[in-house]
Structures are given as C-alpha cells and as structure tokens.
Amino acid sequence: MNTVLSELHFLPPIASFVHFKAADEILLESCENYQKRSYRNRCYIIGANGLQRLSLPLEKGKNNQLSIREVELNFHQDWPRQHWQSIRSAYGNAPFFPYYADELAPLFLHPPALLWEFNLAVLKTIFRLLQWDKPIRLTEEFRSQYPAKVIDIREKITPKSYPPASNDQQNFVAYSQVFLERHGFIANLSILDLLFCQGPQSNLYLSENSSS
C-alpha cells in the first residue's frame, strides 16, 4: 500500500497531485496547527492578465496557533462569488470547462464555515472529476515522523518551494493553456488549470510527471 501524507490545501497545486496520482491512498494531516503563507488557503490560476492568486480570507485571530480543523473562513466580503467569477473568467474558454463547471460551482455557492471542511469538499470533488476512488484517511494524532513506507510531503510543497512560474520547474511537462500565446507556459498552477485544459488526459499528464 503506497500512502502519501500531505497537508490539506485549497485547490492544490499540480505538484501535489503528481504525488497523489502515484499513491494508493491519501493520508491528510488533520492534527497540525494552521501555518501561514502556504497553499492551505491560497491557490494560483492564470488569467488574461497573468498569474492570479486566489486567497481564502480567514477570521482574524491567532490562526497559526489554532488546530487546522478549527480555522474559520471570513465572509465579510463575498469572496465565494468573486473567486468563482475569477475562475470562470480565466477558464470559460478552456475546452473542458463546460464539463466540470457544474460540479465545482456549487462549492462556491454555500461554502461551510470552516477552512478544513471547505478544502476537503473541494479535494473530494476533484478526485471525483479525475475518476479516482483512492481512499482519503485523516491522521488521528500529530507525528513528526512516519515509517519509510509513508511518503511524507508535508511542508515540501509550498508557495516558496514550488512557486508557479518558477524557472526551477522545467521538470513539469508543458501542456496547452488558455493564455499560452500571451504568457507562455506556467507550471504548477492549481489542479483546476490542468483539469479545464486537459480533461481526461489529466491523469496521463500526472503519471508522466511522476515518472520524470
């Protein structure tokens, strides 16, 4: 059994899904404290004007000391509608947007109050769109180390270590993106970019990158 241990990210980057694709099961770290400046509450897409960050606003407080499952989303602004509008503007002309939009849009209509619950709902939806039946388990306690048979990618895929558009990401195979002619290929965006642009071929792409 090939297990990958990861934090739970918001619309995770393609680098995470390369690991998920090669795994038999996913173990999500549910016993950590929230960490700032991570993919836990941000993702990157590419739009007409270039790289765009979508951030989930959090209720003010010392989130860094909170259990990840207790962090609350802030709804003082209508970010769910704004985020979905940004996604639709960026990918409305992508070949597979019409096939997946109806599955994803409801996530932004009535999101739950907690960051963890929202991210988990998003992840399960993406797994379904990829036609994956990989089991998702949650950790029951925080452990800094796991046996070697568990592939631990916690804190290894971050905006600092895997930033989109970085020159250090030549290992990501290029694929056709909506604004390729305008901005060139941008590696390691949110998994949404791959899904909307490549559709069912996303699985082949993830497999190719896991072996490269």
Image (spheres, rainbow, N blue to C red):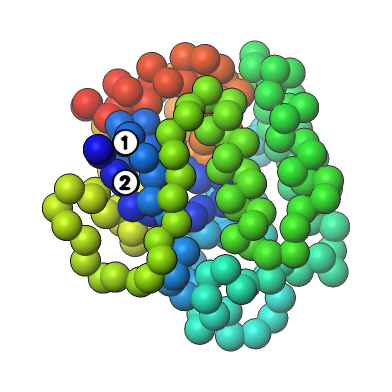
The correct choice, above or below, for 195 with respect to 76 in the image is above
Disc 1/disc 2 C-alpha distance (Å) = 6 Å
SS label for mark 1 = loop
Badge number at residue 77: none
Asked whether disc 1 touches disc 2, contact meaning CB atoms under 8 Å apart, the reply is: yes
Badge number at residue 4: 2
Q: Quadrant of the C terminus?
A: top left
Residue 142 in sight from this viewpoint: yes
Q: What crowding class fits label 2: few (fewer than 14 Cα within 10 Å), some (14-19), or many (20 or more)?
A: many
The amino acid type found where label 1 is placed reads Ala
Residue at 57 percent across and 34 percent down: it is 126
As drawn, is 60 to the left or to the right of 188? Answer: right
Q: x, y percentage for residue 117? A: 64, 57
As drawn, is 46 to the left or to the right of 75? Answer: left
Q: Earlier in the sequence, mark 1 or mark 2?
A: 2
Residue at 64 percent across and 46 percent down: it is 121
Please tell me in which quadrant of the rendered image residue 156 appears. bottom left
As drawn, is 108 to the left or to the right of 176? Answer: right
Residue at 65 percent across and 14 percent down: it is 95
Residue receiving disc 1: 23
The correct choice, above or below, for 197 with respect to 72 in the image is above
